Image: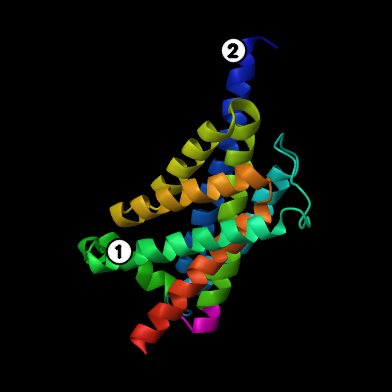
């Protein structure tokens, strides 16, 4: 295989899991909304769409050429890894507080619409979708597939940069893009330094969990 063909093949391998994620996820949401309408809270449709899309993406991920995942727990590194997870969760909380204090959240109609969906339904459903299902899916796509391949082919920092930027852009509205890019960089560094996708899922899920609790307290 020529050098140009190899590069093209690498680009395709990085793009198609993202396209599979984007197409399947949005198609599932469209189908649920079209057939069920407002029968159930919108977050339930997000949850089922996440489960179906995760299965599709995982089937792609397990056959990909990526950095091989490290063991779940290693005695020599566990304290360091817990510290990194805590720092990322703290970063997410601080960013949310700063954005709120600056009044940036109210400036984006798209952000308000997105949040109205994410925080619909019962608090149990919000936790399941936002803290478990969505983190698993998004970390599998952006850290597992994109960042994992980029690290293998181009090194840590291009992997962190590309996966973080793509993670931000898919959130569409300006407020979430800025937040997601910063968090994407942090999660990318965590993944590249540890090769442990489950740590990214935990950090992502805990950040969302804290914000759900804060939001529930404010609303309550």
Q: What residue appears at the point 27 percent right and 64 percent down from the top-left corner?
A: 105
Q: Which residues are magenta?
A: 121-125
The quarter of the picture where residue 189 lies is top right
Q: Quadrant of the C terminus?
A: bottom left
Examine the rendered structure and indicate whether residue 165 appears above or below residue 71. above
- Secondary structure, mark 1, is helix
Q: Residues within 10 Å of mark 2 (few under 14, many from 20)?
A: few
Of pointers 2 and 1, the one earlier in the residue sequence? 2
Q: What residue appears at the point 28 percent right and 68 percent down from the top-left corner?
A: 100
Please identify the dominant SS of the magenta region. Answer: helix
Residue 98 is labelled as 1
Most foreground residue, 194 or 61: 194
Figure coloring:
rainbow
Q: Is residue 107 magenta?
A: no
In this image, 91 relative to 20: left or right?
A: left
Residue that extends furthest to the bottom in the rendered view of this protein: 220
Question: Residue at label 2?
Answer: 4
Q: CA distance from mark 2 to mark 1?
A: 45 Å
In this image, 205 relative to 96: left or right?
A: right
Q: Nearer the viewer, mark 2 or mark 1?
A: 1
The answer to whether residue 52 of the structure is visible from this angle is no
Q: Residue 140 at what x, y percent from top left?
A: 62, 51
In this image, 212 relative to 194: left or right?
A: left
Q: Residue 159 at what x, y percent from top left?
A: 55, 35
């Amino acid at each position: 295989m020529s050098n140009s063909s190899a590069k093209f093949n690498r680009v395709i391998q990085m793009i198609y899991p993202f396209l599979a994620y984007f197409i399947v996820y949005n198609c599932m949401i469209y189908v649920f909304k079209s057939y069920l309408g407002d029968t159930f809270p919108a977050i339930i449709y997000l949850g089922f769409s996440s489960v179906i899309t995760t299965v599709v993406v995982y089937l792609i991920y397990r056959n990909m050429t990526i950095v091989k995942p490290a063991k779940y727990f290693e005695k020599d590194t566990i304290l360091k890894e817990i510290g990194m997870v805590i720092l990322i969760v703290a970063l997410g909380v601080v960013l949310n507080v700063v954005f709120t204090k600056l009044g940036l959240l109210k400036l984006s109609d798209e952000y308000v619409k997105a949040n109205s969906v994410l925080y619909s339904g019962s608090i149990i459903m919000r936790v399941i979708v936002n803290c478990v299902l969505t983190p698993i899916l998004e970390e599998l796509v952006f850290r597992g597939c994109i960042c994992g391949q980029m690290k293998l082919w181009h090194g840590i920092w291009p992997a962190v940069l590309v996966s973080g930027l793509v993670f931000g852009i898919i959130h569409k509205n300006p407020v979430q893009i800025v937040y997601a890019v910063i968090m994407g960089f942090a999660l990318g560094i965590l993944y590249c330094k540890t090769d442990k996708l489950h740590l990214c899922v935990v950090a992502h899920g805990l950040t969302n969990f804290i914000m759900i609790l804060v939001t529930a307290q404010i609303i309550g």
